[in-house]
Image (cartoon, rainbow, N blue to C red):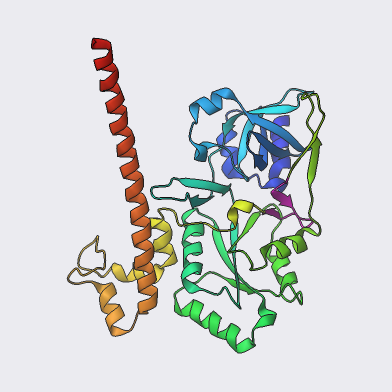
Amino acid sequence: MHTHMNHDELTTLGWSDWFEKQVADQPATTIARVAAVDREQLLLVDQTGPFRAKLAGSFLHQHPLPHEHPCVGDWVCLERQPGDDFGMIHALLERKTALRRRAAGPGGDSQMIAANIDCAVIVQSCQYDFNLNRLERYLVMVMDGGAVPHILLTKTDLVGPDVLAGQMADLRAAGITAPVSTLSNMTGDGLEALERLLEPGRTYCFVGSSGVGKSTLINHLVGRVRQETKTVSGTGEGRHTTVRRELIRLDSGALVIDNPGMREFGICGAESGIESGYSDIASLSAGCRYRNCTHTGEPGCAVREAVRSGDLSREHFDSYRKLRHESEFHQLSNAEKRKKDRDFGKFLKTAKKSFREK
């Protein structure tokens, strides 16, 4: 029973029944959460504080793909002997939510940015950065990974109230239903309201392009920028290495993932997210003649009819189509890549065979 007490203590780090169910049959497992990943090393945190870990060889052997490796926010099972410098990670718990970025280049695989985020705050500045299409892309990405989106408009001190009201109206007209907050880092207006939103034991991240005030905001929330410094022993030099801790617990008890990888990301194959980001189009398409209508010219298409009659904004529909196209292209290129891998495998087999026959 004692070990389950430990798990209870982990609730301040975001542990919940979702994860408890996964380890219910192995209660003696040591559990920790990933606070940072630095190449071969991981910084973990549990109820005793931060410590370092490595991935066990057997884990790497069974999980060769990068997206199967732990990232910030993940929960892992590990072995840690007293006096050891490093824990050994042997299992990764199934993620409740994930934030992925499409890797650069055609046919790129998705790259994990962070896991087990409860709420992703999408930050845009009212002044330079306000862009509905980009906002919708972020929404799709967040919803596709299962986190709850919240929109934060910053730099409100740089625009008049009429501009802000207009942006709010544009958001709602585009069918975006996510909650919206406003903030000025300069005047501090909206900061308290935002802090009240962040609940203890829940995990948040802030996404958006650079220059919208994310770093300033996180520094505000954290109160100071903390660096975790530990001596690496066993190398003979006793040199200091600094791992920047990316999972930060605020004084309020809320957890914030501040990950440099979150600054910008592409869209992953995100069909389910696209549907929920464009719920108005999804509900209209129920009236299309064909069940798998692509809204690109089939007869009896309720969506195109709504655009024609003015019930659905053309811009909203065009951005949906563009996003659909990107997402489909991404899925196709991944499938093609897998086929290439298979073909190459066949080629190797026959080459080996003919080599043996010689």
Is residue 29 in view from this perspective?
no
Query: The C terminus lies in which quarter of the figure?
Result: top left
Residue 231: image x %, image y %? 81, 33
Would you say residue 252 sits in the magenta stretch?
yes
Would you say residue 217 sits in the magenta stretch?
no
Seen in the picture, residue 189 relative to 160 is either above or below; the reply is above
Residue 219: image x %, image y %? 76, 60
Q: Quadrant of residue 208?
A: bottom right
Residue 58: image x %, image y %? 55, 23
Residue furthest to the left: 299
Residue at horizontal 54%, vertical 43%?
95
Residue at horizontal 50%, vertical 46%?
111
Residue at horizontal 37%, vertical 59%?
326
Residue 137: image x %, image y %? 47, 64
Q: Which residues are magenta?
A: 244-257
Is residue 292 in view from this perspective?
yes
Seen in the picture, residue 226 relative to 293 is either above or below; the reply is above
Does residue 270 appear to the left or right of 123 in the view shown? left
Does residue 63 appear to the left or right of 79 in the view shown? left
Seen in the picture, residue 59 relative to 176 is either above or below; the reply is above
